[in-house]
Image: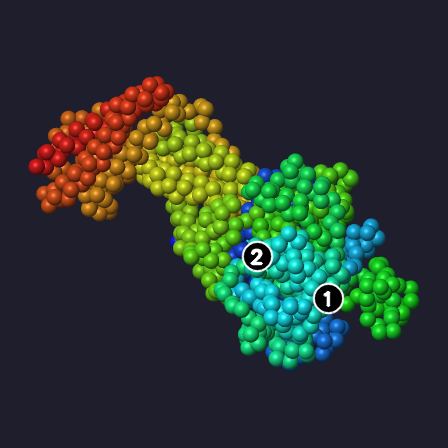
């Protein structure tokens, strides 16, 4: 076997192993395999995306699940892919065009613009795939899919046509959410409400029939006054009943508008009077429909005022126009007041600008199978982790509204609809519509719809449309979906609906058509101040730089340790450094093992020759395996990582390896061989437990130590070691626990006495425990003692530091100069134990506690008080000796 180098170098090890795995086709799924199936579809990153810490978190979790499943004997498919990102990619190309050529897509025309997008995609796209490989992702790259693949595109069009003919997709003129930056409609789910500080303007509308009398209206949007077509109040509001049927003068673009009453008005808001602007507000539009009001649109798609009747505002950007409109109203004596006001404003999730409610002709989908989609989660055919997301999911489905699926972008899946040419050649709601996979028979008489479908409309097919028939039969429904909770509506719910509606499974049974059995929602990564990471804030580190610095395994393990289920993550680079340090610790202990001879792939342990420390580490290994299994069941990856960290760092390295050195460096070959065999057993099990988290490091150590004949990826899961044949396991563990506590007390005593840990000093243990005498060499090593004396009758000189331990009193031989420090230490220890004793005693003097508490609890308190008083007596004696 090759020798482990002194220093672990992830930059040399990680690329080597990843390339070897690819060459060996270790990640390729075989649909003809007889093994049980385990499958995951990767949430497809944007084609022009770059690796973020969010990607690292989600994809590391998926890799952990995939690698663990391979070790458990599953045939694993982790299917990767890319999303064409309609709005995002088009926006990036349009910005590039404006910057480099001062042109828009309309200057180029659709065909040329799409050619430029393809060029952009080929140049900038897919970078994230190579970055995911650097992270160690074990995807089946031979099955990589893209939402604009020919077959996938055809499927999207087929689904559109199918839903149209079922009456579930329709075209209509409705109030929608408009993104003025991207200049496209967006769905309700793409509107993010944010609290914004603005102003509430109180505008005066003069009554036409009563000159000099004014109605005051509170509004946040004076720039849309020119689109007002009525004034409205609640029919039960007695303040304004005498104005019903009269008219008011619109202050800007002056015109008479009717005063009406409508139940939708909130009499408590502002003055109780609403200016009705049907073209620019959803509620106003509904009021306008009920009262047959005209609709006036005074904003362009880009969010600029379009009102030549008010030249001061015409052409201004909407927020600039807001200020100017307030100035005009004030100058005309029509602004009563303006006061600070905070309200929630809807922002586009795509471009992060305030959306505009806009009346527009769009395509909509009536969601099918919503009741069934509710039931599969409620009845746990699909389980959510953490479970509280089930309630959020249900609330959305119970209040679902039709989905606006058309987007005014060119990059994406073009809507397969054509309109019969009119004289104006402009499609309208009364145009004859043809919807089909192929163009109409006489295409020269038709115009195809310019729009594309929402990117999410294509990705809701992702769970099954990415698979061919053979793959689908083996791997669908998929096992688990790992995704961020912020797309529970965008994607998770819609994939469930798609699976139930289109039935891609083997039969029509619901359980065969759900897209996945489990959904794990990842945490959101925030900086140390609690802010969500973003490029604009400059608080998001580059994962590739972290990989260069700490290794992919260090990044993965460090991040997973701080990823509690259902809670946001506060990121600190020190935690990634700890991941690297853990890798170094594991490397060094493996190197120590290799220095003492070759390991065995199937080490044989003689039960009769096991030391008490070997029994302890094997018992703790068993406990760790159990704890890890329990944590995996609930997707508590941070707990898995922490259990493994604690076992490797503390139980194995800090305790067992140090105790094993006594046997390894002894002349007793039987004990030496036994200690090394236990090290092999524990290392083998530990590496397999850690492999899903740290694949490269574990593969390297596994290979160099010769712990298996083939890759660790396919090694059987770690099994618990049978300790049934070991005599008095409980007694052995009690003794080891007492020894470890004694050593820890001795180390604490050193620290409190300001004695350096590397200074070898004489120690004395006053004990009657006969078993302790047999462990003198190991105790001496662990205490770093120059000499360790066990003496049941030891009389300590004045000022000797002492600690009360489970084995007896432990003394450190010190010089006279250390006595003052020891006095301070003893005073603190006497005060601490005295306070603890008083607390226990107070409980025992409480009759209610003694009478109501279980007898065993009361007895335990009495024993505790007795032990504390005994410790206190010994400490006081030591303190008096100093005096």
- Residue extending farthest to the left is 883
Instruction: Please state which of residues 520 and 171 is positioned toward the viewer in this rendering.
Output: 171
The percent coordinates of residue 860 (x first, y second) are 31, 23
| Residue indicated by mark 2 | 269
Disc count in the image? 2
Residue at disc 2, secondary structure:
loop
Label 1: few (<14), some (14–19) or many (≥20) C-alpha neighbours in 10 Å: some
The percent coordinates of residue 526 (x first, y second) are 47, 55
- Which residue: 47% across, 51% down? 569
Label 2: few (<14), some (14–19) or many (≥20) C-alpha neighbours in 10 Å: few
Tell me, for residue 295, which label it has, or none: 1
Is residue 739 visible in the rendered structure shown here?
yes
- Which residue: 58% across, 68% down? 203
Residue at disc 1, secondary structure:
loop
User: Can you say whether 549 is above or below 764 in the image?
Assistant: below
- Residue extending farthest to the right is 442
- Which residue: 28% across, 23% down? 846
Instruction: Please state which of residues 81 and 783 is positioned toward the viewer in this rendering.
Output: 81
**Disc number lying in front (2 or 1):** 2
Asked whether disc 2 touches disc 1, contact meaning CB atoms under 8 Å apart, the reply is no
Quadrant the C terminus occupies:
top left
Q: Quadrant of residue 221?
A: bottom right
User: Can you say whether 469 is above or below 91 in the image?
Assistant: above
Q: Quadrant of residue 814?
A: top left
The percent coordinates of residue 387 (x first, y second) are 57, 40
The percent coordinates of residue 546 (x first, y second) are 47, 59
User: Can you say whether 248 is above or below 811 in the image?
Assistant: below
If you read the primary sequence from the N terminus, does the residue marked by circle 2 or circle 1 appear first?
2
Instruction: Please state which of residues 514 and 478 is positioned toward the viewer in this rendering.
Output: 514
Is residue 466 visible in the rendered structure shown here?
no
Tell me, for residue 680, which label it has, or none: none
Q: CA distance from mark 2 to mark 1?
A: 24 Å
């Amino acid at each position: 076997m090759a020798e482990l180098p002194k220093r672990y170098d992830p930059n040399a090890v990680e690329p080597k192993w990843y390339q070897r795995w690819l060459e060996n086709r270790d990640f390729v799924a075989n649909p003809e395999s007889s093994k049980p199936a385990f499958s995951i579809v990767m949430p497809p990153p944007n084609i022009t995306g770059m690796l973020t810490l969010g990607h690292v978190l989600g994809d590391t979790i998926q890799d952990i699940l995939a690698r663990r499943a391979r070790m458990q004997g599953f045939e694993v498919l982790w299917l990767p892919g890319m999303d064409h990102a309609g709005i995002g990619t088009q926006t990036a190309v349009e910005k590039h065009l404006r910057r480099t050529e001062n042109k828009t897509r309309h200057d180029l025309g659709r065909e040329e613009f799409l050619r430029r997008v393809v060029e952009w995609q080929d140049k900038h796209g897919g970078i994230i795939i190579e970055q995911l490989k650097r992270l160690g992702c074990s995807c089946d790259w031979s099955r990589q899919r893209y939402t604009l693949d020919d077959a996938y595109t055809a499927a999207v069009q087929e689904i559109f046509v199918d839903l149209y003919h079922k009456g579930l997709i329709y075209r209509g003129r409705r109030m929608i959410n408009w993104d003025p930056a991207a200049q496209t409609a967006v769905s309700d789910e793409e509107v993010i409400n944010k609290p914004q500080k603005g102003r509430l303007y109180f505008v005066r509308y003069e009554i036409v029939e009563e000159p000099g009398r004014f109605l005051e209206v509170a509004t946040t949007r004076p720039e849309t006054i020119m689109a007002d077509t009525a004034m409205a109040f609640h029919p039960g509001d007695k303040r304004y009943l005498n104005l019903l049927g009269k008219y008011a003068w619109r202050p800007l673009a002056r015109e008479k508008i009717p005063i009406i009453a409508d139940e939708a008005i909130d009499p408590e808001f502002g003055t109780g009077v609403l200016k009705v602007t049907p073209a620019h507000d959803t509620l106003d539009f509904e009021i306008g429909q009920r009262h047959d009001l005209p609709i006036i649109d005074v904003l362009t798609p880009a969010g600029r005022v379009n009102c030549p009747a008010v030249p001061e505002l015409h052409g201004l950007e909407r927020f600039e126009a807001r200020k100017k409109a307030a100035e005009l109203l004030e100058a005309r004596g029509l602004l009563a007041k303006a006061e600070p006001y905070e309200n929630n404003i809807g922002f586009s999730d795509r471009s992060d600008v305030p959306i505009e409610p806009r009346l527009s002709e769009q395509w909509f989908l009536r969601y099918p199978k919503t009741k069934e989609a509710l039931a599969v989660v409620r009845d746990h055919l699909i389980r959510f982790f953490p479970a509280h997301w089930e309630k959020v999911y249900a609330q959305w489905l119970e209040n679902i509204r039709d989905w606006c699926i058309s987007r005014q972008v060119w990059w994406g899946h073009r809507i397969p609809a054509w309109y019969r040419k009119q004289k104006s050649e402009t499609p309208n709601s009364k145009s004859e519509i043809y919807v089909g996979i192929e163009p109409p028979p006489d295409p020269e008489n038709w115009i195809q719809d310019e729009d594309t479908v929402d990117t999410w409309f294509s990705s809701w097919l992702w769970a099954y449309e990415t698979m061919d028939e053979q793959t689908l039969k083996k791997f669908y429904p998929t096992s688990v979906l790992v995704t961020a909770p912020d797309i529970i509506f965008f994607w998770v719910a819609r994939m469930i609906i798609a699976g139930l509606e289109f039935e891609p499974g083997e039969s029509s049974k619901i359980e065969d058509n759900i897209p996945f059995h489990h959904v794990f929602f990842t945490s959101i990564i925030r900086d140390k101040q609690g802010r969500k990471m973003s490029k604009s804030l400059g608080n998001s580190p580059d994962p590739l730089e972290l990989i260069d610095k700490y290794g992919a395994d260090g990044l993965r393990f460090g991040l997973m340790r701080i990823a509690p289920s259902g809670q946001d993550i506060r990121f600190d680079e020190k935690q990634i450094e700890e991941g690297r340090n853990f890798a170094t610790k594991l490397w060094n202990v493996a190197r120590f093992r290799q220095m003492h001879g070759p390991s065995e792939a199937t080490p044989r342990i003689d039960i009769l020759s096991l030391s008490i420390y070997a029994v302890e580490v094997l018992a703790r290994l068993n406990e760790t395996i159990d704890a890890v299994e329990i944590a995996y069941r609930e997707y508590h990856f941070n707990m898995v990582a922490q259990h493994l960290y604690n076992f490797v760092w503390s139980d194995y390295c800090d305790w067992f390896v140090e105790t094993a050195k006594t046997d390894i460096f002894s002349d007793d070959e039987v004990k030496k061989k036994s200690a090394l065999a236990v090290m092999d057993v524990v290392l083998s099990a530990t590496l397999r437990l850690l492999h899903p988290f740290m694949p490269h490091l574990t593969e390297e150590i596994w290979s160099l130590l010769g712990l298996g004949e083939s890759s660790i990826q396919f090694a059987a899961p770690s099994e618990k070691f049978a300790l049934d044949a070991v005599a008095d396991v409980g007694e052995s563990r009690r003794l080891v626990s007492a020894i470890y506590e004694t050593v820890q007390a001795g180390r604490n005593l050193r620290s409190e006495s300001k004695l350096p840990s590397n200074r070898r000093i004489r120690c004395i243990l006053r004990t009657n425990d006969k078993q302790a005498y047999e462990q003198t060499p190991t105790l001496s090593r662990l205490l770093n003692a120059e000499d360790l004396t066990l003496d049941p009758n030891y009389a300590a000189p004045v000022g000797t530091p002492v600690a009360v331990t489970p084995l007896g009193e432990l003394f450190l031989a010190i010089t006279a100069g250390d006595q003052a420090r020891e006095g301070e230490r003893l005073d603190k220890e006497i005060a601490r134990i005295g306070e603890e004793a008083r607390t226990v005693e107070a409980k025992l003097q409480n009759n209610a506690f003694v009478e109501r508490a279980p007898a065993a609890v009361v007895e335990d308190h009495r024993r505790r008080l007795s032990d504390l008083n005994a410790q206190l007596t010994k400490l006081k004696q030591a303190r008096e000796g100093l005096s």
